[in-house]
Amino acid sequence: MTTDQTLEPTEAATAAASGASATERFAADKSPFEAVKDTSPERVDRLAKRVLNAVYDTIREEKVSYDEYNALKAWLIQVGKDGEWPLFLDVWVEHEIEKVATEHREGNKGTIEGPYYVPNAPEQGANGTIPMRDGEAGTPLTWTGKITSTDGTPLDGAKVELWHADADGFYSQFAPGIPEWNLRGTFTVGADGAFEIHTIQPAPYQIPTDGSCGKLIAAAGWHAWRPAHLHVKVSAPGHELLTAQLYFPGDEHNDDDIASAVKPELVLAPVTNDDGSVSVDYGFVLDPVRG
Ligand code: MBD
Ligand code: FE
């Protein structure tokens, strides 16, 4: 008998693998229920009935058949088995939740979080390089910016948490064979609110097509693409958390993102340097917490 550990062969990056990790992470967090524990029965009744009524209207108006109903039932069961509820909801529902949640803001409005955020990425300071592999593929990107409050005051101690896909469109911790914190980092600014982040440009991203969400996409004749994007969470004491994504001009999917998460003010204006690297300036304005 040996205590040597055998290395698992690298599994392919499948929908099942990334969906299962997204579901596991979300299900481990008990705070979603805690946060709504004081919701009144009247509110639950109202929301449940409105959603059901929208379903009834669709059934009546479209004369939905038993075959279609049974296919829906089978598909919904499969979404759960594939672990694709986080993916489904974040791609087709979250954008409206985010709009409503941030419509009062005077600073940056942001966009959806998506299924692949992981808290507590390694700290890199105000001027640093995101964790990446030796020879990480992709165009080097230098991103400078400043974090201020709505009155223009720089926010000492504000943080940018940045995560994004690699040049093949894979996220660390949700696809196999990638170092744990690859292309995930936290950048904390000083009194001037300024940061300088070094990373690589991510690739356009296709949501997994081999699971239930892919099945819906294929059956409906849609495409699975999101434009290339950088995910951020920007936070500062006494200010509302900003969750956003930044996009690159000219990406063919900026106008037809499967997740409907592109906003014109989130498209960067990068410049290409003589050595082929890219530089961009983009800062954030955070709203003070009200009340
Ligand atoms: C992603 O990378 C993403 O950002 C969203 C919103 C959905 C699926 C994958
Ligand atoms: Fe993403």
Image (cartoon, rainbow, N blue to C red):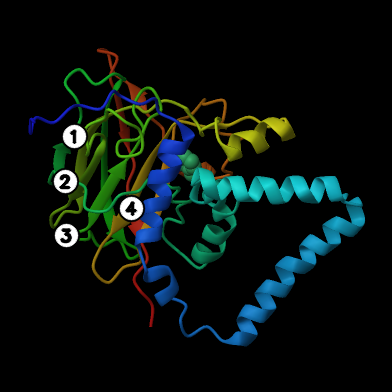
> Observer-nearest residue: 217 or 272?
217
Ranked by sequence position, the earlier of labels 3 and 4 is 3
Residue at 54%, 50% in the rendered image = 80
Amino acid bearing label 1? Pro
- Residue 286's spot in the image, x, y percent? 35, 61
**Labelled pair 3, 1 in contact (Cβ < 8 Å):** no
Query: On residue 131, which mark appears?
Result: 1
**Does the Cβ of the disc 4 residue fall within 8 Å of ligand 2?**
no
The 10 Å Cα crowd at callout 4, few under 14, some 14 to 19, many 20 or more, is some
Ranked by sequence position, the earlier of labels 2 and 1 is 2
Q: Is residue 254 left or right of residue 18?
A: right
**In which quadrant will I find the N terminus?**
top left
Marks 3/1: CA distance?
Answer: 21 Å
* Residue identifier under label 4: 233
Residue at 27%, 49% in the rendered image = 161
Amino acid bearing label 3? Gly
Badge 3 marks a residue whose secondary structure is loop
**Labelled pair 4, 2 in contact (Cβ < 8 Å):** no
Q: Is residue 237 left or right of residue 105?
A: left
Badge 2 marks a residue whose secondary structure is loop
Ranked by sequence position, the earlier of labels 3 and 2 is 2
Query: On residue 210, which mark appears?
Result: none
Marks 3/2: CA distance?
Answer: 16 Å
